[in-house]
């Protein structure tokens, strides 16, 4: 499915809670829409998380679902606070157009994820990129950005990376295809050398695991491209698979879909070198760069 616009974890928790309250009250979506005097389409989009939820609408829904009176005060206050939190803008909004609109939902999810697992076949993942590596990659684009635009994007990258060193950092597990270690920017081997040294150093962080999938591993189930699995503590139903393309992104949220990618990641993890062997290979590649 295409990315919903307000894809923060708080928003997803809110719509999950509202959907559960409706079901517990015994109403269909059509019945609620009629009672609220809005379209059934709005109700469906609201419960799917595709549109923001206005706080007055949340209040009206809580009353309709029977959550009135002092005995429900604690629950209604919690839902309303969740609704307020879901509407807060994320840190990335201060960077303006350095963050494409289609990428904003991912940043909202990444910022609140407690675990991030990723497979990257060609490119070093963003959370492990050095500024110079990312600048060189950006300059390969056929629609070249200005130096100012690139620097704003670099600043976004660096702020994302800071979370790996903070209290409450997510567990970050990346599997890199060996090819990603062998692609220097055109004529800039020194940048690749620094990049590999950075990966080796970051792999020593207590919450970071780096594995290399060597060419010798042969064919594997992720031959069709990279993916990320974002995990959250509140509910297994919130885990999400993120697949990025040149002009947009795909988010997979169904339990069966997430389970498939969990299985693929486990398969890759088993075929890849272990973390110590992976670090040794990266160090070896650094020595081979002239």
Image (spheres, rainbow, N blue to C red):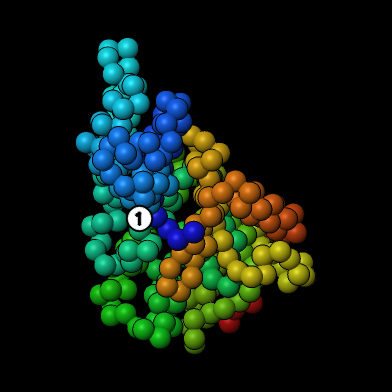
What residue does disc 1 label?
5
Front-lying residue, 169 or 108: 108
Side of 187 relative to 158 (left or right): right
- Does residue 129 sit above or below 160 in this rendering? below
Which residue corresponds to the image point at 31% horizontal and 47% vertical from the top-left? 39
- Horizontal and vertical percent position of residue 50: 38, 51
- Farthest residue toward the top? 71
- Horizontal and vertical percent position of residue 65: 35, 26
Q: Quadrant location of the C terminus?
A: bottom right
- Secondary element under disc 1, as helix, strand or loop, is loop
Front-lying residue, 241 or 2: 2
Which residue corresponds to the image point at 53% horizontal and 79% vertical from the top-left? 184
Side of 61 relative to 177 (left or right): left
Side of 78 relative to 201 (left or right): left
- Horizontal and vertical percent position of residue 201: 53, 57
> Which image quadrant for residue 248?
bottom left
């Amino acid at each position: 499915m295409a990315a919903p616009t307000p894809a923060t974890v708080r928003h997803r928790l809110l719509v999950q809670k509202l959907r559960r309250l409706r079901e517990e009250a015994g109403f269909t979506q059509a019945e609620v829409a009629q009672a609220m005097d809005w379209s059934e389409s709005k109700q469906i989009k609201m419960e799917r998380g595709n549109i923001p939820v206005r706080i007055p609408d949340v209040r009206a829904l809580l009353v309709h679902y029977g959550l009135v009176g002092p005995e429900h005060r604690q629950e209604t206050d919690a839902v309303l606070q969740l609704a307020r939190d879901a509407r807060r803008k994320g840190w990335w909004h201060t960077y303006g157009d350095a963050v494409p609109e289609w990428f904003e939902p991912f940043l909202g999810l990444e910022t609140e994820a407690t675990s991030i697992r990723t497979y990257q076949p060609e490119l070093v993942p963003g959370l492990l990129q050095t500024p110079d590596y990312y600048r060189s990659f950006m300059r390969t684009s056929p629609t070249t950005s200005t130096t100012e635009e690139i620097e704003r994007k670099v600043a976004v990258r660096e702020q994302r990376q800071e979370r790996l060193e903070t209290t409450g950092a997510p567990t970050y597990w990346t599997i890199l295809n060996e090819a990603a270690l062998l692609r220097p920017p055109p004529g800039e081997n020194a940048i690749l050398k620094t990049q590999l040294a950075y990966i080796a150093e970051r792999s020593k962080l207590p919450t970071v695991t780096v594995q290399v999938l060597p060419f010798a591993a042969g064919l594997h189930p992720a031959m069709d491209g990279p993916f990320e699995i974002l995990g959250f503590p509140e509910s297994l139903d919130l885990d999400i698979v993120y697949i990025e393309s040149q002009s947009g992104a795909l988010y997979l949220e169904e339990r069966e879909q997430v389970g498939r990618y969990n299985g693929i990641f486990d398969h890759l993890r088993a075929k890849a070198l272990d973390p110590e062997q992976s670090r040794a290979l990266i160090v070896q590649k650094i020595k081979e760069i002239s």
